[in-house]
Amino acid sequence: MKLMRTLLTATALVAVMGGSVYAKQLVFCSEASPAHFDPGPTAGGNDFDASSRTIYDRLVEFEHGGTAVTPGLAEKWEVSADGLEYTFHLRPGVKFHTTSYFTPTRDLNADDVIFSFERQWKSDNPWYQYLEGLSWDYFQGMDMPKFLKSIEKVDDLTVKMTLTEPNAPMIANLGMDFSSIVSKEYADQLAASGNLADFANKPIGTGPFVFVDYQTDAVIRYQAFADYWRGKVAIDDLIFAITTDPAVRAQKLKAGECDIMSYPAPADIEGLKADANLNVMEQEGLNIGYMAYNTTIAPMDNVNVRKALSTAINKKAIVDAVYQGAGQVAKNLIPPTMWSYDDAIVDTAYDPEAAKKMLADAGVSGLTLDLWAMPVSRPYNPNAQRVAEMIQADWAAVGVTANIVTYEWTEYRERGKQKDRPGAFQIGWTGDNGDPDNFFATLFSCSAIGVSNYSSWCNQDFETAIQDAKKVSDQAERTKLYTRAQEIFKAEEPAMTIAHSKVFMPMNKRVQGYTMDPLGIHRFDNVDVTE
Amino acid sequence: MLRFILQKLALIVPTIIGITIASFAFIRLLPGDPILAMAGQHGVTPERYEILKEQFGFNLPIWQQYFNYVGGILQGNFGISLATKRPVIAEFMTLFPATVELALFAMLIAVILGIPAGIFAAIKRGSWFDQVTMGVALTGYSMPIFWWGLLLIIFFSGYLGWTPVSGRIALNFFFPRVTGFMLIDSLLAGKPDGFVSALRHLILPAIVLGTIPLAVIARQTRSAMLEVLGEDYVRTARAKGLEPRRVVGVHAFRNALIPVVTTIGLQVGLLMAGAILTETIFSWPGIGKWMIDSIGKRDYVSVQSGLLLIALIVMAVNLVVDILYAVINPRIRVQ
Amino acid sequence: MSTDAATPTVAAGPLAGLREFWYYFSMNKGAVLGLAVFVLLILVAIFAPVLAPFPPDQQFREFIRMAPPWAGGTQPQFLLGTDEVGRDILSRLIHGSRYSLFIGFFVVSGALLVGVTLGLLAGYFRGWVDALIMRVMDIILAFPSLLLALVLVAILGPGLFNAMLAIALVLQPHFARLTRAAVLSEKSREYVTSAKVAGAGHLRLMFITILPNCLGPLIVQATLSFSNAILEAAALGFLGMGAQPPTPEWGTMLARAREFITSAWWIVTMPGLAILITVLAINLIGDGLRDALDPKLKRS
């Protein structure tokens, strides 16, 4: 008996020891293949998950689970009193990855930082056009060429960035994916051998994971970087199993073929929550789904007509049926988790009778208009066609006939942004950096008409508020200005805000320490798995 | 024989030229701007737009774009994918083996089950076996396979848990890619359990893709057998008192095989169409799914070269079938 | 049927021909069953507004994704349950039958008209006309049909009508080839020569003299195309390129509700079943027609 017990204990011990020898593996069922692994010229969340958040680091980083900026490759930085000069002090001793295709001879220095930006900025940089048809969308989109005057090396570990005018969101921009720091030494080596394209397909960074292999449209493999400057991460192997269909992803998670998945279909969430092996995390998304009225075309140039149309829509029913509990009714353009959100705003109440009366008072009867619906599912609106079907039914109840219009996705946006586009246009936005400016100015500033101001709405008071908010850096002061902007927005109703979607992250219970990110990216550097 | 082949080839040349024109033209008629499609939610500045347009040669006269395109193909250059910036031919070659593996396996299932089913149904004409088999075959032939695939996933992967949900092999198997066929590569890497895993992943999509060919082959085999069994020489063989199994096996089956082989060949084009749906449902990394994704992304270059390559492959297979048919059945050559 | 070469079948008394046809057709029990289901479907389509318990796009917001009463649902008025925005599935299926049958008829008529004309021209005139037409057909047939239809719909814009046009275009080469082959074999026959001698014009020769004698295989092919058209339209709908919501087209219904396959199976299962039953019925008819019209099989 005693012998038996000893034997059992011994076996258990061996088992435990044996277990600890095995590599800790995390499998992520991701939603789409990355275009490639250079985060500068790509634009999709799936591209960033696979490159900037695994392989690369930035000068500054967003904290886990928030939008506050923390030191990254830059240990600290100073901003001059006039807001024009940023001096970054780089962390010493940061190693680049060593792989079968590259062995670094030096640590990270100022040259790498300067190269990382100049390749996106200076058209005479040999890497500006290293792949056919490259475009640096985010660098352009965040207006970096307009704000950047120069980036200079002070010494090996100090970089000075000079701006043309003060720009409060600049530090947040440097935490974004396009600002990932790449290796100049690797670039030089590839330039010498002529294999420039390898830069995007065989990536080298300083990040927590080293790229191992990519099977097109199927699997991406990474290994933990042993010399990571923050220390090696807890898991050893990270695998992305690319699975485009959300229902199939959910099935795979249930079957244990993956440990964690992105973007479950709203319909599957109940079933995933009910599974005893799974844990479903959720978070308010940093996004807005809305419907833009063209405010320059009669009768929608009349604010009362716009309000009547919004009053006729049962938003709650839409959010229940389409978002299926994965969203909340939006009363403001920015989501409640963002600073400066004005909770004092009262939302337009659903009241078909009142809507009928408002329309009659405005002298509108027998109104027929186009109702645009995106052809694709977006994080801020899982099914625009279904939303359109419901709005169509609601409007029919107050005597408004809606024709549902849809086009292929790029064509849809292209037609939608035309100044003379008729009707009500469904669209939305996912925040890039957690700054309210990224919503207000991008979507409703006068200069965005014909670009991303789908309402063709230019209101002077609103414009003054958001432009002033860009120039001051005091957050309390900015909050006041954005509160004012939200009041004007509600009073003028250039668009009906529909919903902020919730984001869900279902995972196996063995996954420990995952934090959801409000910017919609997936990071695995602080994750551990239990056996 | 040689003359027959040359004749066939001569007919194919204008068709190939037509196909290059068609695949080139289609994609230029597509609405949605390829350059805008590449940009994210921020869009592109007008200056940048012009630069990109020039870079891709979209600013050249249309005929010049066409000749550049054909010139490139003749040198083996099928262009660079707008989405991934990799050569299209490289993308195609990495994904194509996955489709071939799936299609071959689907065809194997269809032939192994379809031919015996057809033969027995013909021999036992009018029996319950015949009626049930042909009923099932017609149902299979009428199946919306995208729906069928979803049902099978829910039942076998979801409910019973017998088969993996999607993918080509379990993720813990990681070996060098030699042929691109998981079944072969796993064995080359000396991992028989990897072979088993690949097989388990292959079975459900192959059943879905093989359903319609199976039905067609079973029906075709049955009617070919019936026809042959009615021929004089078979009747004679029977009358001479030859053993029934020998009559069927030697005389009837061999002659019935000719139309069946043609049918199998003709299924190749249909398999490609089926692969689009099957690969979409099972997230199978093959060219069917790749084409759908490329159309969605407005990846002009991938779609036009993908269309061309697929059409060329279908034509090549049909040519081989034609020649094989002529070899088996010399009468055709005279016509 | 065509053994009596001197006298075209049309002249041999249509009633007798029809009776003979029905005799052979009704020998095939499956075909009769298929025909019965098909007739039923046509009746359902015609009387859809009367038969359907609810309008197809009426949304019962309080009963979203309600299961059928025989599968745990609490609302007996929704016999097959409700869909993702609370519409009665049975009503939508009933109205959807109109679309499916319309797709079939439209596509087959279009493909027949174009294909037969091209085939007649090619077979009758031979030479460069033949070469040109047949090469174009070869090109169309070299692309997998669904892929070609997909690209065409992407060009024309997603929608039911464009989907039908695309399917008709990819199906018509089969008719062209069939017609051409039939014309080639008929052209040298005596009755054609005598009509020519009698001074019949090209059009008369093509359409009145030759065409009626090629009808058998064309009818069989038309039936096959009918079911193919329904399947392909559903596949396009499934890939988001077919009919657009709220149209109750079966493939589109299935595609839009695909996310509910595990949580609300009836939304996905019912339209798929409707497609299967319809296509099966038509294919049964097709088999019966082939048996009745194919003289070779008739002998055995």
Image: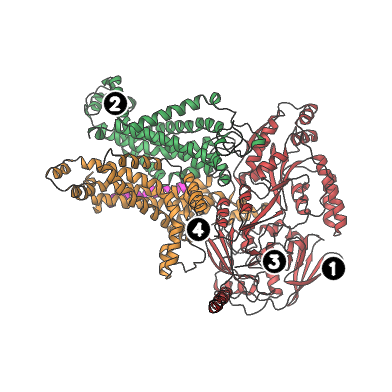
Chain colours: A red, B orange, C green
User: Which one is in front, A519 or A232?
Assistant: A232
Q: Which residue is mark 1?
A: A80
Which is closer to the viewer, label 2 or label 1?
2
3 and 4 marks on the same chain: no
Q: The residue under label 2 is which amino acid type? A: Tyr
Q: Chain of mark 3?
A: A
Packing grade of label 2 (10 A; few <14, some 14-19, many >=20) is few
Left or right of C160 on screen, residue B143: left
Q: Estimate the spatial distance between the alpha carbons at disc 2 and disc 1, rounded to whole Å.
A: 98 Å
Q: Which residue is outermost to the left?
A: B240
Q: Residue at x 30, y 20 (%)?
A: C14
Q: Chain of mark 4?
A: B
**Mark carried by residue C23:** 2
Q: The residue under label 4 is which amino acid type? A: Gly
Q: Are marks 2 and 1 in contact (CB under 8 Å)?
A: no
**Mark carried by residue B58:** none
